[in-house]
Image (spheres, rainbow, N blue to C red):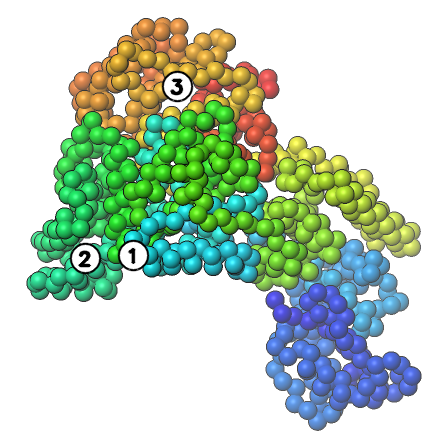
Amino acid sequence: MNFVVLDTEGKPELSELAIVDSQGRLIYEGFSSDYPNHNKNLPNLKSLKTLVSEFLALVQGKKIICHYALHDIEILQSSFRRVGLVCPKLEFECTWDRAKSLWPALESHSLEYLSKHFNLQVNKQHFVRDMAHAARYDAQFTYQLCRRLMIEQLKQQPNPFSASRVDTPFQTHPDYFATYRQEYLTLESILADIKLDSNRQSKGVVVIGEPGTGKTHLMMRLADERLANNRLLFIRQPNHPKAVLHHIYSRILESLVQSVGSATQLDYLIINSFYKILSFRVTSQKDQEIIKALQDKNLDDLGAEGTRRKHDYWQHIEKRIGEWWAGHYSSGGFALAILKGIVKYCSYTDPRRKDIATRWLAANILSAQETELVGLPNWGEDLSQEAFSLEAISVLAKLSILDEPLIIVFDQLEGLGLSHNREILLNFGEAIKEIFTHVPNSLIILNMFPDRWEQFQASFDNSIIGRVSQYQIYLRQPDETELEAILRVKLQALDIPLELLFSSEDLEDILGQKPIRGVLNRAADYYNYRVRQIPLASVKENLHKPDSKEQLEQQLRILQQQQQKLTEVFLDLVQVIQEPGSVDLIKLRQQFLPESPKLQLHTSVNIIEYLTQKKTELEKQYSNLPIISDYDDIGKLKTIAEAFNYIKPIRLTHYRLGKRVLPEHIVVETDNKNYVMGFLQVDPSTSSFTSRIANFNELVSLHHHDRFGLFRDERLTEVKGKVGRERITQLNNSPNGKFKLFAKRDRIALDLTYQTIIDIQNRDLDVDLESALKIFITDQHWYHWLFSMFGFTKSFAQAA
C-alpha cells in the first residue's frame, strides 16, 4: 500500500502541515509564513503557496490518511483557493471513520482518546494533551493509530507467513524471483542443452541446500514457469525395497494426471506428441481433421463421448501411433500396450474412465467390468511391476522427444539415509542408474541436504554418482535484503507495509533466523503476536544451532526486548499515577507479569496446526483415488512402526509360508503378543486374491497367539466372488483374525501419520519426532486404533 499520513493545523487556511510516510518517518514539516501568529524565526517557514505546492508533489499518486479527514480536506481546499490554485482530486482515508466502524461502543473516537485507550506511543512516549494540535505530533500519533487499525483488520485474514513450506511443485506460493535467480537460469540452460542434444541424453542435477533453504520452492518456480511446455514429474522417497521403480512410476503417473489449466499434463504430452507423429505423414482427410483438433488443443472436436465419430478418430490415432513406434523402436515388450492405454486415457472425458485407465497404466489388475468399460486387456498376474515400470517411464520419455524434455524431481529423500532404510537406499541407487540408461530426454533432479548428499556419495558407486551429479547447484543463505524482500512478497496480498506490521526490533529478530523457512516461521510467530496477541515463543532451537557468538547476540536481543517492555510498563504506571483510569490495569498486570512462554506448548500448537491443515488436505483429496499398492501401504506402516521406536522399542519381522505367496505384511512383536498387519489391494476376481487370503488364513491358524488384521481400501472393487467372500468369512470367524475395509478415517489416519513422520525426517516440519508421535497416542482427537497394533493401547495413551 502506497500511502502517507497527514495532519493540518489552521482555520480556514493552513498554518502548519506535517506528512509521515508509510514507514512512520516524518518526511515533511512546514509552517505558513502567511499565518500572522507565527514567529518569523520559526524553522521551515514557507509561503502558503509553497506549502500547498510541496504538499502536492509529495502526495501525488498516494493515498492520504488523516484523523477526521473532513477537517483536513476543508483546510486544504481553502488554502488552494487562497493562493489561486485548483485543488486536484485526491484519495483520502479517515482513521476517525474506521475507528468508529470497528469500535462503535467506545465513548469517544478522538485521537487523544484512542491513543490513550490503545496505549499508543511515539518515541516511547504516550499521548500528552498539552502537546497535541501540533501537526507533527498529531500526524505521528495518527500513523500509530493507522497501524493499530490495519492490524485489527488483519485478524480476519490468514497468517501470510504460516504457509512457509512448499509440499509439491504444483502448489502456488508467493515467490520472490530474485532469490536463486541464477540457479533457476542454470536449470533452464540444462533443459535447453538436453533439447539441443541430437541424442537427447538425460542429465542429472543435485540441488543441495540446508533444510528450509527453498529447494522445493525452486521446483515450484520451475513448474510455474515451465509447465506450459515441459512436463514436471514429482517423486517422494520410496518406502519399500521391492517396489522402488513401481513407486517412482506411480508418482510419475500421479503427476501426469495433475491439471494444467483445462487439461492434464498427460493430455498435453500426448496432444503435442501425437500432433507431430501425425504431421510426419498426412495421408487422409481424417489425418487433417485430427491434426487440426490437436493443433487447437481441443480434443472435443474429435467427437462427443460414446459417439461413432469419436471412436473412429481415436482408433485411427491409435493405429498411426503404433505404426510410428514400430518404425522407430522395437515392437516387443509392453510399449505398444502402454501407448494404447495412453490413447484410451486421452480419449475419455468421463472421470471414472480416466481413473480406470490411470490404474491400468499403473499395471494394476482390474475387474472384468472395468477392463470392458475402458476397452483394455487385463494384465497377467505374473507381470513384473518393476520391469513394466521402467519400460513405461522410457515410453513416456521417448514420446517427450516430440514435445519437450521431462523434468523428473526427486524430493524428500532424507529418510533413505536412516539405517533401517539401507536396502531401499541401495535399490533406489540402482533404479536411478536404470533410469539414466533407459530413459532419454529428461532432466533428473535430486533435492538433498548437504550431509545426506555426502552419505549418498559414500553409498553409491561412481556409475550412479557420476550420472546424478553432472551438475551440482548449492543454495546459499540469502542476505537480509533478499529475506526482507521475501517477507514483502508474502504481504502483498494483504496490502500492508512490512514496517507497519513489524517494529525494527521485530525485523531484526526475524531476519536473524536461518534458513529462509526459519525467517518465515519467525515472521509467522510475530504476526500472531502483533495481530492475535498470541504469546511470542522463544527462538526455535531446532531451526538452527547457533554458535557461542550467536547465542550471546540472541541473549542480548532478548534482554533488550525485556528492558523495552519494562520501560513501557513503567511509563504506563506513571500514566496511571498522573491520570487514574487512563490505563487498563488488568492488561498492565499481564504486561508486567506475563506468562513465561513454554517451548513445549508452542511446539504442540505447531504440530496441531500442521495436523489440522494436513488432515483437511487429505479429506479434500480422498475422492481422487490415488494409485494404491500393497507395497506402498506396507511401506507406510513400516515407516510408522520404525518411528515409534523413539517412544517404545518395537521389533519388526515378517512371516513365511514355504514358497507360497502371502499378502504384503509386517509383524510387530510386543511384550504381550504379536500383531500381524497386511494389505490385499489386488482385484478380488483374480486367483492372486483368493490364494493370498487362503495362505493368510492358514498363517492365522498356525499362529493362534498372534493377532492378525488384513486390510483393503474401501474405494477399490468390492469382493463379490463366492470363493473370495468365503475366505473373508473364514478369516473373520477365526478368534485372532479380522478382514477390515480401510475406511476414510483409517486411510487419513495412516497417511497423516506417515506424512507427519516424513515431513519431520525431511525437516519440513520444525518439531521433534517424539513430541509429534506422543500427540498421536495421547490426544483422543488424533488417536486411532492403528496405534494399538504397535503396542500403544488406549490405557497406555491415557497413562502417557
Q: Nearer the viewer, residue 554 or 670?
A: 554
The residue labelled by disc 3 is 666
Residue 716, percent from left and from top: 27, 32
Kindly report which numbered mark, 1 or 3, lies closer to the viewer in this rendering.
Answer: 1
Closer to the N terminus: mark 2 or mark 3?
2
Can residue 626 be seen in the rendering of this structure?
no
Say what amino acid the circle numbered 3 marks: Ile
Residue hosting label 1 = 198
Q: Secondary structure at mark 3?
A: strand
Residue at 43% in and 58% down: 188
Frontmost of labels 2 and 3 is 2
**Relative to 751, 434 lies left or right:** left
Q: Earlier in the sequence, mark 1 or mark 2?
A: 1
Asked whether, in this view, residue 549 is left or right of residue 526, the answer is: right
Contact between labelled residues 3 and 1, with CB atoms less than 8 Å apart: no
Does residue 107 appear in the picture of this structure? yes
Report the residue at 50% width, 25% height from top: 419
Q: Give the SS element for disc 2.
A: helix
The quadrant where residue 468 appears: top left
State how far apart marks 1 and 2 are (Cα).
18 Å
Query: Gap in Å between the C-alphas at discs 1 and 3?
Result: 48 Å
Task: State the CA–CA distance, disc 2 to disc 3.
Answer: 48 Å
